[in-house]
Amino acid sequence: MKRIYFCHMILVACLLVGCSKPVQPRPSLPVGWIDFSPANMGFSVYLPKKPAPFPVPNVPKEAKLMKAWQIVGPPMGYRLVNSRGPFTKDLKVELSAYCEKFDRDFCKASGATVNSSKDMEIRSLQGHRTDVTIPGGYTGFIVSVIKGDGIFSLVAVGPPADVNRPELNTCIDSIELK
């Protein structure tokens, strides 16, 4: 009887493991790009070059960490924002609300308009993507992902032909939160 029970449990375990969605590996690093992973920041992402630190205005006082970096084109501009703190603890189910506020603030500051906005998954991380149009003939996207008490956002802006390059999908798919 114990042997039948044991075999049944192994079968159930195998079915559960077989049905779980495997985490996709990171894509290959594009030629000439870097794997940007600043010390003690808890994230990694592929970028065309090393970004420079960028001051974050109006950091919430309860933030344990809020840092930003940017790359000023040409042809593309990038901004990365990494946040950790108790203010993010309840966002696991409210990522869309956080992203709507982030998108609104970005659009207000840049004059951009939202073309589309959707929840997504990036290699098992809960995420959200918003595509925008920016005055002057530019387009871009904002991708945010969440893990634990951390939120990472990537903004990329440039000419439409550059925003649609395959390398940018690799950039998005390379996001890792540790």
Image (spheres, rainbow, N blue to C red):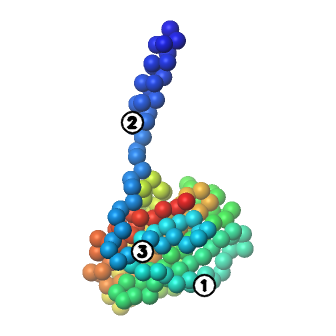
Q: Which residue corresponds to the image point at 61% horizontal and 68% vertical from the top-left? A: 40
The residue beneath circle 2 is 18
For the residue pair 114 and 51, the one nearer the viewer reads as: 51
Report the quarter where the C terminus lies. Answer: bottom right
Mark 3 or mark 2: whose residue is earlier in sequence: 2
Q: Which residue corresponds to the image point at 59% horizontal and 59% vertical from the top-left? A: 91
Secondary structure type for disc 1: loop
Q: Name the residue furthest top.
A: 1
Residue 46 sits above or below residue 49 on the image: above
The residue beneath circle 1 is 55
Q: Quick check: can you spot residue 76?
A: yes
Amino acid at pointer 1: Pro
Mark 1 or mark 2: whose residue is earlier in sequence: 2
Residue 29 as seen in the image, left or right of residue 154: left
Task: State the image quarter where residue 55 is shown.
Answer: bottom right
Q: Which residue corresponds to the image point at 32% horizontal and 85% vertical from the top-left? A: 159
For the residue pair 116 and 147, the one nearer the viewer reads as: 147
Labelled pair 1, 3 in contact (Cβ < 8 Å): no
The residue beneath circle 3 is 34
For the residue pair 2 and 111, the one nearer the viewer reads as: 2
Amino acid at pointer 3: Ile
